[in-house]
Image (cartoon, rainbow, N blue to C red):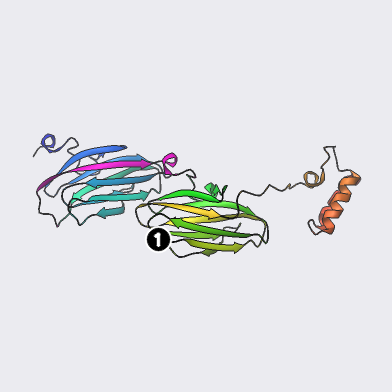
């Protein structure tokens, strides 16, 4: 059997000979015990959604750019579609291997490989939000998102001290878990995985003013849609860090007497420190 007689991609029996593919569907043929390899360029913000339709039994394996295996999937039912969804950990060229399962006695069979590179614009409205630094603001009380290949979606919300936040998470299928973190990014709560039809809830009271984080974790190599509900939304306004910025409210250069009086009132309410008053006085004397 020559490569020309094999299929349009042959020879593609290893990493070095992997056939380059992108989004789309590709028809191939497996002869006896061979494996077909394909190469897909992708970024760490992407996920890969792979499926193979075939009349027999195959295994699909996904490899990192360094060619170490990160995922595999197979079907034990003839005529079914094998699907593998994986969130990618880095930029580079990923490799897909399609091989005949040892339980199959069929010598030759055709298959169709479907490749869907899920970029952030095709993920959901919040992507990319795979970490604390890229966390999406909870801007509405109800938010619909999607987990691809076991990824984690990060959200943030501003809370004042003693404010209580209540989170409800409902998946449309598969397992999801919700976690919460304080402004120092220490975990302060989590709930057990919930399946379709169930709702995970989590309630916490803020111990300090700042940005809190809510994380939705997926599991398994599949696609899971979910609804995230929150009684708190938005972020807190940034507080001035300079003494002049904090108390200069009348747009006149320097700090005038009325502004000092306002600062003293604020101090009496316990919102500024005695050192702040001393720095204001020094600024006025200078």
Quarter the C terminus occupies: top right
Image spot of residue 224 (x, y percent) = 39, 52
User: Does any portion of residue 20 appear in the rendered image?
Assistant: no
Residue 71 drawn in magenta: no
Image spot of residue 215 (x, y percent) = 50, 56
As displayed, is residue 171 above or below residue 28? below
Q: Which of 190 and 279 is in front in this view?
A: 190
Number of on-image labels? 1
Q: Give the range drawn in magenta.
A: 103-126
Quarter the N terminus occupies: top left
Q: Nearer the viewer, residue 183 or 127?
A: 127
Q: Seen from this angle, which residue lies furthest front? A: 197
Residue 119 drawn in magenta: yes
Residue at image point 35% right, 45% down = 48
Residue at image point 10% right, 54% down = 105
In the displayed structure image, the side of residue 26 where residue 128 appears, left or right: right
Image spot of residue 62 (x, y percent) = 29, 49
Image spot of residue 181 (x, y percent) = 56, 59
In the displayed structure image, the side of residue 169 where residue 8 appears, left or right: left
As displayed, is residue 215 above or below residue 285? below
Q: Mark 1 points at which residue?
A: 195
User: Does any portion of residue 198 appear in the rendered image?
Assistant: yes
Secondary structure found at label 1: loop
- Local crowd size for mark 1, using a 10 Å CA cut-off: few (<14), some (14–19), many (≥20): some
Residue at image point 45% right, 65% down = 192
């Amino acid at each position: 059997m020559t490569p020309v007689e094999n299929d349009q991609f042959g020879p593609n029996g290893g990493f070095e000979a992997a056939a380059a593919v992108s989004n789309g569907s590709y028809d191939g043929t497996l002869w006896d015990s061979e494996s077909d390899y394909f190469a897909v360029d992708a970024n760490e913000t992407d996920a890969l959604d792979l499926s193979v339709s075939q009349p027999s039994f195959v295994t699909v394996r996904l490899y990192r750019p360094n060619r170490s295996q990160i995922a595999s999937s197979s079907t034990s039912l003839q005529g079914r579609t094998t699907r593998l969804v994986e969130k990618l950990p880095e930029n580079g060229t990923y490799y897909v291997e399609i091989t005949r399962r040892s339980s199959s006695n069929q010598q030759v069979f055709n298959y169709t490989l479907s490749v869907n590179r899920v970029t952030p614009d095709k993920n959901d409205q919040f992507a990319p939000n795979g970490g604390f630094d890229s966390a999406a603001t909870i801007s509405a009380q109800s938010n619909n998102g999607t987990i691809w290949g076991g990824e984690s979606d990060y959200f943030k919300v501003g809370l004042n001290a003693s404010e209580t936040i209540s989170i409800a998470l409902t998946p449309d299928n598969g397992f999801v878990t919700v976690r919460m973190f304080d402004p120092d990014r220490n975990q302060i709560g989590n709930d057990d995985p919930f399946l379709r039809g169930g709702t995970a809830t989590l309630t916490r009271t803020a111990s300090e003013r700042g940005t809190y984080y809510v994380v939705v974790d997926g599991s398994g190599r599949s696609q899971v849609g979910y609804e995230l509900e929150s009684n708190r939304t938005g972020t807190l306004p940034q507080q001035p860090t300079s003494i002049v910025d904090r108390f200069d409210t009348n747009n006149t250069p320097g700090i005038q007497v009325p502004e000092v009086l306002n600062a003293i009132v604020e101090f009496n309410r316990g919102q500024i420190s005695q050192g702040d008053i001393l720095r204001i006085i020094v600024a006025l004397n200078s």
